[in-house]
Image: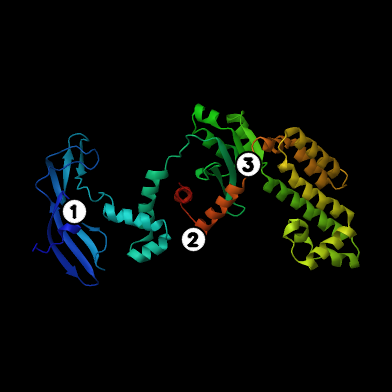
Amino acid sequence: MSRLSVAPYFPFRRVKLMGQEFLAENRVFIHMRPSKQFRPICHFCGGPTSVLHGWEERAIRDLDLARQTVFLRCRYRKVFCPTCQKTRVEDLEFFHPYQRVTKRMATYIHELCQVMTIQEVSEHLGLDWKTIKEIDKVFLEAKFGSPKLEGLQILAIDEIAIKKRFFYMTVVLDYQTGRIVWMGEGRSYETLASFFQLMSPEQLLGLEAIALDMWDPYLKAIREFTPHVKIVFDLYHVVAGFNKVIDAVRNLEYRKASQSQRKIFKGSKFLLLMNKHRIKSQKARQHLNRLLALNKTLAKLYILKEKLKTLWTYRLPHNAQKALNDWCRLARTIRYPLVRSFAKQLQRYSYGIINHCSYPINSAKIEGSNNKIKVIKRKAYGFHDLRYFTLKAIQAFAH
């Protein structure tokens, strides 16, 4: 029968186990020292050295064992490295000289952070949350620190609010795979330009189309760095913009209505803005019909809203252009500057709608990713370290 030993649980070749010590509160200390079988090596460059500078000792947190919190009390040498020409800590392989946990413990922490919040991991392991975050961040930087820009063809670009009305981040998504390629602070021309500047001329030429909303700073950057790319405006953002126009006109019409008519206006906001097929209640449909019969202006706007969505169903550019011109012609019959201004804007950006015929893409994927990013933000009760937040978001969509 083999002799009972804890050595197999600590398979670190450059150290020798010297003993163990049990303390109160389920804490175990395993004593170690460097093995004489190995010549010390520099942790920085990996070069061998033999000039001893001194000895130090440290308690390093390891994986728990049988509900015991395990610390490795290890003696190690500080040596002079002839390659670095500096005094360095020797590399014992199982821990990093500037961390208080073993490498396998750090890997375990990183794995937990993929399914638990930092605070939950901190409470589970009894470690400070800042330590947990920094360990996780090291792994994320190694894996996702440099954006993967090869093979990009179709992108979706949008912004996400980190602090509402105060701070935004730009999100760039690979439309074909759904992964987040890059995130940057702000939603300005400079923000998106800094992304394009990361790409080589060949990678920029490989881009074919980009889906986004009608945000001029983004459009300026796209035209400057990728003038050949087809810009595609998203149905969701255009309809959302027109819904704001409808609501503003509804409020103006309400003020002009008599007291008896105002009763029909009340509670009609979302009926006007909802998709027709989503109004299930008979009472709600009757309410909407009464309002449209009462007010011709709102009836026209409701028809325009439904026809606006059909512009993204065409596959032939000339048919789409004709339908868009007809839509704008009808919109100009409504004597509200808001409506006419929207029609003018739509014609100015018509190329982004016509391009949908060649590239039938939209920002549904990036809207879904933004919702997932918001969940990540809420789970962490907000991120003060934006770099870490970016890495966590990229990790969540990695394939």
Q: Is residue 256 at all visible to an observer of this figure? A: no
Q: Residue furthest bottom?
A: 24
Give the vertical position of 290 relative to 299 (above or below). below
| Most foreground residue, 177 or 20 | 177
| Most foreground residue, 243 or 90 | 243
> Residue 392 at x, y = what percent?
45, 51
Q: Which residue appears at 71% of the width and 34% of the height?
A: 351
Q: Is residue 160 at all visible to an observer of this figure? A: yes
Q: Which residue appears at 63% of the width and 44% of the height?
A: 362
Gap in Å between the C-alphas at discs 1 and 3? 53 Å
* Amino acid type assigned to the residue bearing label 2 in the image: Lys
* Mark 1 or mark 3, earlier in chain: 1
Give the vertical position of 104 relative to 222 (above or below). below
Tell me, for residue 36, which label it has, or none. Answer: none
> Residue 127 at x, y = what percent?
33, 62
Pointers 3 and 2 in contact (C-beta within 8 Å): no
Report the number of numbered marks. Answer: 3
Q: 10 Å neighbourhood of mark 2: few (<14), some, or many (≥20)?
A: some
* Mark 1 or mark 2, earlier in chain: 1
Q: Which residue is mark 1?
A: 11
Q: In the image, is 106 to the left or to the right of 227?
A: left
Q: 10 Å neighbourhood of mark 1: few (<14), some, or many (≥20)?
A: few
Depth check, mark 1 against mark 2: the one in front is 1
> Residue 62 at x, y = what percent?
25, 59
Depth check, mark 1 against mark 3: the one in front is 3
Circle 1: element type: loop
> Residue 124 at x, y = what percent?
35, 65
* Amino acid type assigned to the residue bearing label 1 in the image: Pro
Q: Which residue appears at 52% of the width and 37% of the height?
A: 195
Q: Which residue is mark 2?
A: 379
Give the vertical position of 234 relative to 64 (above or below). above
